[in-house]
Image (cartoon, helix red, strand yellow):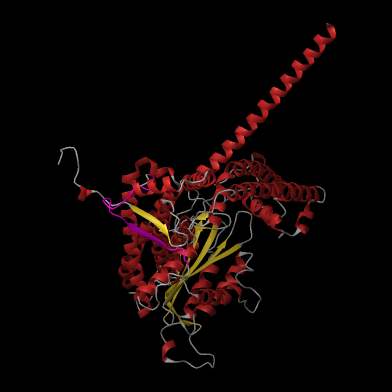
Amino acid sequence: MEPGTEPAAELQPPVTVRRRRGGATTSRVTYSKETELKTTLVELLIYITFLVTLSLMTFGMVSTNMYYLNKAMEDFFVERASDSGINFRSIGSRDDFWNYAEGPLLDGLYWKSWYDKGTTNDLKNTSYIFYENLLLGVAQIRQLKVRNNTCSIYPYFRPFLKSCYSRYSYRAEDKSDFGPSNESEWKYVSASSLSPWYWGYVGFYRSGGFIVTLPRSKEESMEKLTFLRQNGWITRGTRAVFIDFSTFNANLNLFCIVRLVVEFPATGGALTSFQIQSVKLLRYISYYDYFLASCEVAFCLFIITFIAQEAIEIKKMKMEYFRRAWNWLDMLLILVSILAICFNIYRTIEVSLLMEELLSDAHVYPNFYFLAFWQVIYDNMIAVNVFFAWIKIFKYVTFSKTMSQLSSTLSRCARDIIGFAIMFFIIFFAYAQFGHLVFGSQVDDFSTFQNCIFSQFRIVLGDFNFETLEANSVLGPIYYISFVFFVFFILLNMFLAIINDTYSEVKADFAVIPDQELHLADLLRQSYHKALVKLRLRKPDTDVGDETLECEETPSTKRKDVSKPSKGDKAQEKRHPKSPKLHRGKESFHRSDSSVASRSSVSPAQFQQLIRRTSELEKELNNTNAKISRIMKSMQQQKNTSGKTA
């Protein structure tokens, strides 16, 4: 063997792909498309498994019972009125607050007897709200104050005003002790820096303040509230009062944390708001909880696998990896998932450490609001994660022609939509500021700039009460009619026109592309047929003429070059010479076969580019033809004029 040659055994036999029907040879591109489709299908099935695991894990954190428990607490503590007709929503002054606290609040917190006035052993030392929800510890009332002389008074009014209390801010907060007869009975209690603040209607309130806890009996609590009211616990500087208590429902394994807030703004009067949150802090109790724990473990394994996969892609593609939008979505999902896993571990450890401490003293308020707040943040984080996880499915369905058309439509009209969005929001914000300045002091829907934006979206959707704009009988109709005309009739129709035109162009481009894609239904049908044949549940059917692909390996030693005729063929050609027509027919057949092969090697994107280039060349040829015709006409005119002159 010569040193420059390779052994024949090391040569790989060529692989030819043939169809059973017709015996025509197909291109290798079809085979690669089938392989790519199968790979995408496997990835899609794996991702759907991950998505199902994530959905089971998230739906296990939320149940319909949470809604009904929140609704029961809201109806009882917010909607229920006293004998004087005062409920929590109708509180409008300090007197109304004390009437509510001494009436519906105490009646709801302390349940010492059944509906038939009989006392049982379960209700002697504890309180079961609605007979099912155990009151944990005692309730707590907390207030935040501001200092006197914290606002600026115009010099002309200073002789008439000796005191001035500004709106709440942490810099103007009053932390000095006070009490009846200038005693220091009520002291300020600071909160930790990690305690969540409360966002009210007119302020952003911190967690500290002057705290009063109610006793475990209704009679003692009534005496304490009466003492607070008679000794002026709520002053002119009071800006917010918080009522906090927690319950536990053993039937559902749910904690319910209730916070009732009454704000006393600098304008006078009172504003009410509330937060009722049902959370599941004790996670692993029933068999279903342990099933959810297994889903959480599977979720962690999926995330570890995705991290390794993305790391391999980053190492392989380097900076090209960060130029694709789907890769950024993958990184976002991984980041949010890691944060959720870390917080879940922290929450489980923190609950186990704090549960015994919070419930050790029955005469102290157990602050579950901190745990409930972060549980809600965790739920929101998981909700965002699930949303983007569902959006990622579009990454795996691009092999469909319909989905390719939609994605191409959105990508092609992105610039037009961005330009339209700039114009739309310029007009939209102009109307929002106009509405806030004209109706802000009289209409609640326009009282803030944010409310103006939401109200205008409601106008676009047709959900708006026009009678509220009659506060200004001149500018109200002008604002409404002009906004509907410009935004609804013009701008929205422009947006739809952009989408429709782009979709028509994309559909026209896809119509001229040869349909060479492998459909998912055909692939699934072929896989199902092959599985039945392998399981011997069905005989291999070769006469049906199916479209299954077959790979045939032919050794190179036995392979013949079909382009060169053999000796027998040459002799036969001499005996029977081919007619010119038959020869031309065979040549045309070979040309068509080569054209099909070349056409199959062009991707859809390249084909669209060729179409656009062809249209550009056609325009240039038309322009050139027009110029030549003009030159010919001018030459003819010059010839005619020269003939006349002669």
Q: Quadrant of the N terminus?
A: top left
Figure disc tally: 0
Residue 286 seen in render: no
**Camera-side residue of 406 and 175:** 406
Residue farthest to the right, as pictured: 644
**Looking at the picture, does residue 119 appear above or below residue 219?**
below
Task: Indicate the quadrant containing the C terminus: top left, top right, bottom left or bottom right.
Answer: top right
Q: Which residue is more in the foreground, 636 or 165?
A: 636
Q: Quadrant of residue 608?
A: top right
> Which of the 4 image quadrants contains residue 249?
bottom left
Q: Which residues are magenta?
A: 545-563
Residue 575 is at least partly visible in this image: yes
- Considering every residue shown, the one lying at the far top of the view is 646
Say above or below: 387 vs 73. above
Q: From what the image shows, is residue 223 above or below residue 642?
A: below
Position in image of residue 534 (x %, y %): 35, 73
* Horizontal and vertical percent position of residue 393: 47, 59
Tell me if residue 259 comes above or below residue 120 in the rendering: above
Residue visible at 82% across and 51% down in the picture: 473
Task: Answer whether residue 617 is magenta in the image.
Answer: no
Decide whether residue 559 is among the magenta residues: yes
Q: Position of residue 339 (x, y in %)?
A: 37, 57
Left or right, 151 with respect to 436, comes to left
User: Of residues 393 and 421, which is closer to you in this image?
Assistant: 393
Main secondary structure along the magenta-highlighted residues: loop
Percent x, y of residue 299: 35, 65
Q: Residue at x 19, y 43 (%)?
A: 6
The answer to which of 446 and 589 lies nearer the viewer is 589
Name the side, left or right, on which 602 lies relative to 153.
left
